[in-house]
Amino acid sequence: MTQEHYRIIGGLGSPYSMKMRAIFRYRRIPHLWVQQNMETRKEVAHVRPPVIPIIQYPNGTYHNDSTPMIYDLEARHEGRSIVPEEEGQAFLAHLIEDMADEWLTKMMFHYRWFLERDQKQMSLWLAFDTLPGEGLETIENFAKSFRARQVGRMALVGCTAHNQQLIEQTCTRLFALLEAHVTGKERYLFGARPSLADFSIMGQFSQLAVDPTPCDKMRAEAPFLFRWLMEMDDLSGLEEGAWRDPAAPLSPALEGLLQMAGEVYLPFLEANKKAYEAGEETFRFEALGLPYEQGTFRYQVKCLSELRRRFKSLSGEAKARLEPALDKAGLLAALRASA
């Protein structure tokens, strides 16, 4: 690795890896893509939490957690920014990116590990990625243990039969919303250039486009979204377009995403926060008339606090422009609440 390059240690089956690789490509930041294997697992064993992608900076340090890295790269590298210039739009992009990272990922995990068909194929493919040249028997043995571990985590992260309806209904709704958007006159959520929100959605849905059951669903319900995901993977040749006018009415896609945040995502974060503060290991809430239950996570308490902090830090002008749309989506009271 030269001093000018980053190393992205990730995996084709990791939504956050695909998200970060696409960002590096679009921003034309020199990097090497390293598919995670047993050797790289040893190399990064000290990095916590042990999740990919793990990005080695040119100075040799290792980092993960995609959202902080996005902002760090913005500070380190000029040009081709993925954060909208206007502060209100930047806040909306962060909100949508956060929802994609923490709620859309449930769609990815649900479809990958809920049905036998997907469990079998994807455990074998992920093992194949991790064990190059190790032979079929080794791949199959690794796949068996990895599959058991992932299926065993489903209740913890909320991907259960009890929650199936809400997860699948929000997925169907997003497919329709984004299919209409990508076939319109703005290919990206904030104009003629992609934002961190677009890349976060791309990361999660890149997996739905590969796994058997959601792949069939996407091809049937959102074929142009399917193709948009392929294009998002490498936008290094895209000219740096303009952000949409912040004074213009929100697009139907942005309105729809905010509506989902108000109806599903912020109530999810609120319920998790209350359970965490009460010392409860699990929490329940209801959205779209459907029940949902999962384990309590400290990290998602941090997500809610950060959203509220960012909203409170907006200028009065930006708040005045956003508040009608946030109120309509049922988000305003939740964002104004104390962190």
Image (cartoon, rainbow, N blue to C red):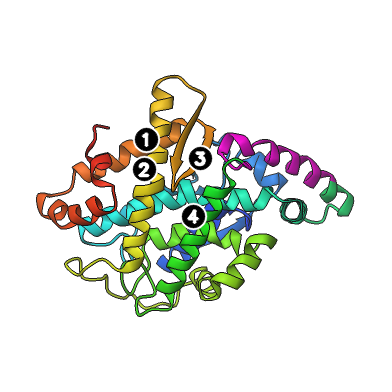
**Could you tell me what secondary structure mostly forms the magenta stretch?**
helix
Q: Taking 314 as reference, is 153 above or below it?
A: above
Label 3, secondary structure: give it.
Answer: strand
Is mark 1 in CB contact (under 8 Å) with mark 2? yes
Disc 4 residue crowd, few under 14, some 14–19, many 20+, Cα 10 Å: some
Instruction: Bin the neighbour count of mark 1 within 10 Å (Cα to Cα): few under 14, some 14-19, many 20 and up.
Output: some
Q: Position of residue 241 (x, y in %)?
A: 31, 76
Q: Which residue is mark 3?
A: 291
Residue type at numbered disc 3: Pro
Disc 3 and disc 4: Cα gap in Å?
A: 13 Å
Mark 4 vs mark 2, foreground winner is 4
Q: Tell me the crowding category of disc 2: few under 14, some 14 to 19, or many 20 or more residues within 10 angstroms, Cα based.
A: many
Q: Which residue is mark 1?
A: 270
Determine which of the numbered discs, if any, sits on residue 266 in the image.
2
Residue 253 seen by the camera: yes
- In this picture, which residue range is highlighted in magenta? 141-161
SS state under label 1: helix
